Amino acid sequence: MKRNQKISTLRYQIYVFISLGLLGLYPLVKTLLDANILLTTGRVVGADDWLNLTIAKKEKIALDSQPDRKRILIVAGSNGLFGISAEKIAQKTGIETINLSSHAGLGGEYILNRAVKIIRKGDIILLPIEYPFYYSSGISDDFQEKTLNTFMISYDRESLYKISPMALLRFSLNNVFKDLSSPEYRSYFDGHLSKKDISDRLHQQRDRVENNCYSGLTLNKFGDETCNIGREKLPVNPRILEPVCDQPDRDKVDPNGYIKKFADFSERIGAKIIPLYPITTYTKYSDTIGFKNCAEEVKKFWENQGIKFYDALEDSLLSPSLMLDTPYHAKDAGRQKRTKKIIDLIKQNIGVI
């Protein structure tokens, strides 16, 4: 009788052990399955796809430039993509200008890391990075945002080693409990898009009047976005009125030092940084103490690095009629206005020409 009880107890313990083991393995198996689905591109066409095309084109322009020529590089998220004309700067200064700006969702550290591969001695770097970049802890925290993690998994797996183990673990656990009923999640299992499928869909996206800004197919030879040309008469989009920066915690500006590291790198190789305020909408928030303090912290940060900050905040704030669909995206008229100020700033104050 006791022997049978021992056997039953042992079987129960084995059953519990196996169940717990399978339960523990589930997150790993589920995450590996999700990663495999992402890596085979069996999913909807997303921001990572048009961004890959956009960044590849811009970097090719930069890498194809003559090695002994002076260059101006524009490095930022989408405020630089939509709001500064490399073409106009090149025309007015006679210096080759390339717009490397992409999408703030990739995070400041990732964007600056990509730029490091392009920058060379003698380059002039226009740096209108977005306000949140100044308060980001860096690439591991940014990886928790959808744009960066899907981009890296789909198109830049070699850089995944830069993500901390804890950030990767958090990402894995978030994947495990993802909403299986969401259309986007279900689409990972449907269609299994090939590279040709993705290319075809991006071309279709380019041809949609309401969404053609996000295809990677509307760049000019300077890397500028052209989808915002001819849209001056569009009504004001409510999204452009959202606040972009509140009162910052002074102790948390560049908390892990990735912007300083980029500045040190640029100085070391002989490239010159011209920091700028990002282009944003002038709204009721622009006059608040919080926003003005935020802008002041940006200026102080660069001056603490020993880099002069000549830009004027009022020159970076555009009226709502000059903005497209977010607080950082200008229409072409807004871009031309902002670019003129930047050209004047380069010529009159920096003395690099």
Image (tube, helix red, strand yellow):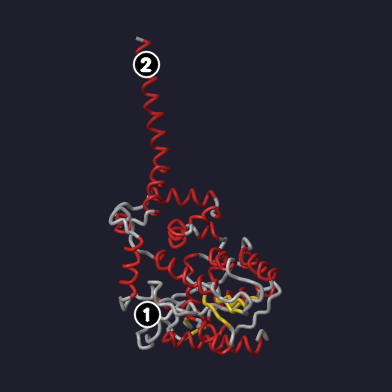
Residue at x 46% of width, y 52% of height: 171
Which sits earlier in the primary sequence, circle 1 or circle 2? 2
Residue of label 1: 237
* Real-space Cα separation, disc 1 to disc 2, in angstroms: 71 Å
Residue 292 or residue 134, whichever sits in front: 134
Three-letter amino acid code of the residue under disc 2: Ile
Residue 324, how many percent across, how many down?
A: 40, 81
Residue of label 2: 7
Q: Which quadrant is home to the C terminus?
A: bottom right
The numbered disc on residue 281 is none
**186 shown above or below 334:** above
Residue at x 62% of width, y 60% of height: 256
**In this rendering, position of residue 139 left or right of residue 260:** left
Residue 180 or residue 294, whichever sits in front: 180
**103 shown above or below 280:** above
Q: Check disc 2: other Cα within 10 Å, few if <14, some if 14-19, many if 20+.
A: few
Find numbered disc 1 in the image and state the secondary structure of the residue it sits on.
loop
